[in-house]
Image: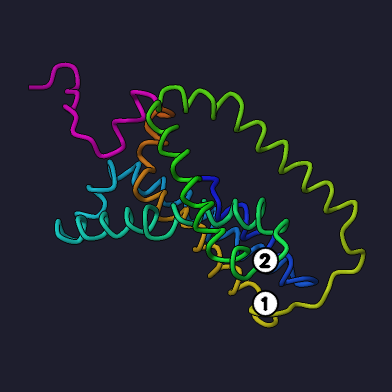
Amino acid sequence: FFGAGNLIFPPFVGAQAGAATVPAIIGFIVSAVGLPILGVLAVTFAGGFDELARRVSPAFASLLGVAIMLTIGPCFAIPRTATTSYEMMVAPFLPSRTGWGGWTTQLAYSLVFFAVAFLLAQHPEKLSAVLGRFMGPLLLAFIAVLFIACLAHGAVTPTQPTGDYAVHQASRGFLDGYQTMDLLAALYFGIVISAPCMSPTTRLFVGRPHTPVSAPGSC
């Protein structure tokens, strides 16, 4: 589920937590990594999101599904993709953050960004091949370069925790881990991820209907 939130929140946690990064990042990992893994396991063994949520009620399953899709779609996650790339690629090179250096530039950038994304989405079969073969490894390489550069040229002495991380760093990191929205994605798309990894024998335990095998000689 690597996305914009996974790219921006860990450096943010480290920058604000400073010398208390270890407890902060532990809390962050629990909610941003551990809970999504548990979410994938939950929907896998329930047989899918609908089967899991219907244990509360069918109406709850529908409402929760709509809420998750709106959250990881047009309300939060999709706009954040344009905001993240703008703040990292365009904003640092603008002379001013007001007027044309502010919301107007960001609006123009977002329109171009989503127009290009829309055009690329018209050919999903080519898009998945390009992402898997080129963009994925390239992204990992850039992150590795960024990580090494920060270790080589970063501050020798960690700063004191500031902002929201001035106190209770572990709990603050745990709360910020939710902002990656990976747990929501895991609940809704977990079965898609886990199904190809399961053998036919394992699928018998996912909750899908199957015909029990009678013992030899039984009626």
Q: Which residue is mark 2?
A: 13
Q: Residue at x 67, y 77 (%)?
A: 165
Which one is nearer the viewer's eye here, 48 or 206?
A: 48
Residue 204 covered by magenta stretch: yes
Q: Position of residue 74 (x, y in %)?
A: 36, 55
- Residue at mark 2 to residue at mark 1: CA–CA distance: 8 Å
Q: Farthest top residue? A: 217
Q: Which mark is residue 97?
A: none
Residue 115's place in the image compared with 56, above or below, is above
Q: Quadrant of residue 83?
A: bottom right
- Total marks drawn? 2
Q: Quadrant of residue 206?
A: top left
What kind of residue is marked 2?
Val
Mark 2 in CB contact with mark 1 (< 8 angstroms): yes
Which one is nearer the viewer's eye here, 34 or 2?
A: 2
Look at the numbered disc 1 and give the secondary structure of its residue. helix
Q: How is the image coloured?
A: rainbow
Q: Which residue is mark 1?
A: 165
Q: Residues within 10 Å of mark 2 (few under 14, many from 20)?
A: many
